[in-house]
Image: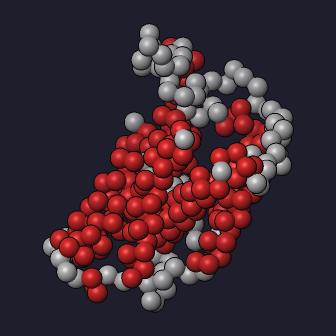
């Protein structure tokens, strides 16, 4: 229901359609839970709420747990697992974070139409620096990575252009430090419609691909398919890079791919096999 309501509002260019969809779906979910007492999903109750049970019968405020703040050791990984394994971990995280951000930047800029006359993303260096600082800060704070996410496309698609939306979003995230129980009232069923819309916005970009050129279309197809199946933008980009360079190399068209494409493909191959290598080193 929330999904179709969001589709209708979005197609009608209703500003704030995503917010209206989440809020109305949450109110409906709270009402259903209050009347029917559905409860969480389980083996005996497969049709229950997936993660959060939408109920106002709980505390709305909570003090944050800051016990992990600053609890890190810069050289701990090197001492615990060895130089080779730690280097592979750093390489894996660096590659994953960089290409996740790159995919997000491309998706957001295309949706917002904010590329310059040469098709480049403005202030890309600032974006990467801020993302790196956020990633480091998240690790130092004992939280998940504070990186850019592809869900930002819905905000840009809804009109966010100047950065003020990011300031407001950041302020609201600060508020959730003490309002975490209230944020937990929103069930995943109410917010998941937004992710479907994200997929729609991303699929709009495929019209720019020349699907009649197999050497371009097949790598693009691999990228599009691998991303949702592996839950990773990086994996999709890596599959596309490797497929593109392999096709060019085996067809004798080495010069048509930039040397950096081959270097990046080799890095992705190492990225994909780094897991088994780390497991082997750990077992050894």
Residue 35 pos. (x, y %)? 53, 15
Residue drawn at x 55%, y 23% is 31
266 on left or right of 135: left
**22 or 145: which is nearer to us?**
145
Quadrant housing the C terminus? top right
> Taking 159 as reference, is 274 above or below it?
above
**149 or 267: which is nearer to us?**
267
Residue 66 pos. (x, y %)? 83, 40
The single residue placed furthest to the left in the displayed view is 212
Residue drawn at x 23%, y 65% is 218
Numbered circles on residues, count: 0
> Taking 117 as reference, is 58 above or below it?
above
The single residue placed furthest to the top in the displayed view is 44
Q: Is residue 201 visible?
A: no
Coloration of the structure image: secondary structure
261 on left or right of 132: left
Residue drawn at x 57%, y 61% is 91
> Taking 60 as reference, is 162 above or below it?
below
258 on left or right of 137: left
Quadrant housing the N terminus? top left
Residue 244 pos. (x, y %)? 29, 71
Q: Can residue 263 be seen in this view?
A: yes
Q: Which quadrant holds residue 5?
A: top left
**136 or 173: which is nearer to us?**
136
The single residue placed furthest to the bottom in the displayed view is 117
Residue 16 pos. (x, y %)? 54, 55
């Amino acid at each position: 229901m929330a999904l179709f309501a969001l589709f209708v509002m979005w197609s009608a260019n209703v500003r704030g359609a995503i917010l209206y969809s989440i809020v109305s779906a949450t109110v409906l979910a709270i009402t259903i839970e209050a009347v029917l007492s559905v409860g969480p999903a389980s083996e005996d109750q497969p049709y229950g709420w997936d993660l959060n049970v939408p109920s106002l019968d709980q505390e709305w405020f909570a003090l944050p747990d800051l016990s992990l703040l600053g609890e890190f050791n810069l050289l701990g990984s090197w001492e615990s697992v060895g130089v080779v394994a730690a280097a592979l971990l750093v390489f894996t995280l660096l590659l994953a974070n960089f290409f996740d951000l790159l995919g997000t930047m491309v998706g957001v800029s295309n949706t917002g139409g904010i590329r310059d006359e040469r098709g480049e993303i403005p202030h890309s260096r600032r974006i990467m620096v801020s993302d790196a600082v956020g990633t480091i800060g998240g690790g130092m704070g004992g939280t998940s990575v504070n990186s850019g996410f592809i869900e930002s496309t819905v905000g840009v698609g809804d009109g966010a252009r100047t950065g003020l939306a990011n300031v407001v979003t950041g302020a609201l995230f600060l508020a959730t430090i003490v309002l975490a129980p209230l944020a937990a009232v929103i069930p995943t069923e109410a917010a998941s419609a937004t992710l479907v819309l994200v997929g729609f916005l991303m699929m709009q970009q495929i019209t720019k691909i020349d699907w009649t050129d197999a050497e371009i279309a097949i790598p693009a197809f691999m990228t599009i398919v691998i991303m949702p199946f592996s839950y990773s933008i990086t994996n999709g980009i890596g599959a596309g890079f490797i497929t593109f360079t392999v096709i060019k190399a085996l067809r004798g068209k080495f010069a048509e791919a930039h040397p950096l494409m081959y270097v990046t493909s080799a890095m992705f191959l190492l990225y994909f096999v780094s897991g088994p290598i780390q497991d082997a080193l750990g077992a050894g």
